[in-house]
Image: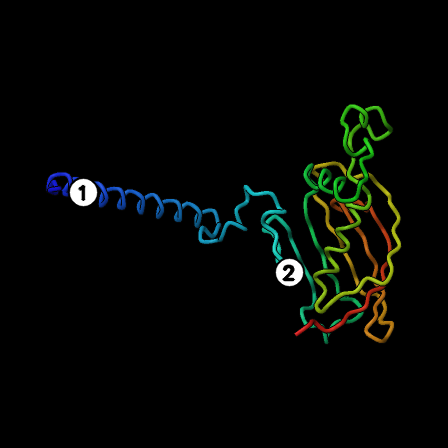
Amino acid sequence: MSSNPNRSALLDTWTETSSHVFNSVLEANRAAFAAFGVNSDDDTNEDPTLPPRERIESDEDLPEWTIERTEDDRTELGVGDRIEFTKTISDDDVTNFAAASGDTNPLHMDDEYASETRFRGRIAHGTLVGGLISAALARVPGLVVYLSQDLEFHNPVRIGDRLTAEIEIVEDLGNEQFRLTTQVKQDEEVVIDGEAVILIDDQPV
C-alpha cells in the first residue's frame, strides 16, 4: 500500500499543534496551582477530590490536617512537651466509623431521628472524636504504645466541626512511660477531657 504524503504531513502538523496546546495548558495549570500554594506535581494520593481513605499512607499526613509539636527528638521528650492534631469531622468520618465499629445509633446516622432528641440534630460518635487523641499520640516521636486512657465527654460534636486534640506530658513515670493530659477542643471549648499513659519504644530499624 502506498503512503499518502499529504496525510502524513497533516498528521505531523496536528500532533505538533496538539502537543503545543497540551503543554501550554499544563503550564497554565501549574502556574495557577503555584499561585494558590498548591504543588501540582503531587501524586494522586494528594488529590483533594479523593476521599481521605484513598489518599492516606502509612506515617503520612493529609493536607487538610494541622499538626504542631514542641519536640521532634524522642530522646529529648519531657514534661511540658505538647502535640496538637486538628481536623474537621465530616459526614464520611461518621459513616465510616459506624461501619467500622458497628455503632449505627440513629443519633449519629439519622437526621430526622436525631432532630427529635435533646441534641436537635446528628452528633458524631464520642469514640470517633476521642480518636483524635490517638491521632495526636501517633505524632509523638518514637513508637507509641497506649497503656491507658480516661475520658470525660463534656459537649457534643456536630458534623462539620473542626476540632483540635491537645496532649501534654505532665509526668515522666520512668521506664519510657509518661502520663499525659488529653483534651479535644472546638475553638477553646473542651468537648473531651482526660488523661493517658503511654510507653515510647524505639522505632524499628
Q: State the CA–CA distance, disc 1 to disc 2.
A: 48 Å
Query: Which residue is under mark 2?
Result: 59
24 lies left or right of 176: left
Q: Nearer the viewer, mark 1 or mark 2?
A: 1
91 lies left or right of 185: left
169 lies left or right of 75: right
- Which residue is more in the foreground, 80 or 143? 143
* Residue drawn 72% across the image and 73% down it: 202
Q: Secondary structure at mark 1?
A: helix
* Residue drawn 82% across the image and 56% down it: 182
Determine which quarter of the picture holds residue 110: top right
Q: Earlier in the sequence, mark 1 or mark 2?
A: 1
- Which residue is more in the foreground, 11 or 163? 11
Determine which quarter of the picture holds residue 6: top left
Q: Which mark is residue 98?
A: none
Measured as percent of width and height from the top left, residue 62 is found at: 60, 52
* Residue drawn 75% across the image and 36% down it: 158
Measured as percent of width and height from the top left, residue 45 is found at: 54, 51
Identity of the residue furthest to the front in this view: 1
Q: Secondary structure at mark 2?
A: loop
16 lies left or right of 141: left
Determine which quarter of the picture holds residue 123: top right
Amino acid under label 1? Answer: Thr
Measured as percent of width and height from the top left, residue 151 is found at: 87, 51
Query: Which residue is under mark 1?
Result: 13
Residue neighbourhood size for the residue with mark 1, other residues' Cα within 10 Å, grouped as few (<14), some (14–19), many (≥20): few
Amino acid under label 2? Answer: Asp
In the rendered image, which quarter contains the N terminus?
A: top left
In the rendered image, the vertical position of residue 84 relative to residue 28, given as above or below: below
In the rendered image, which quarter contains the C terminus?
A: bottom right
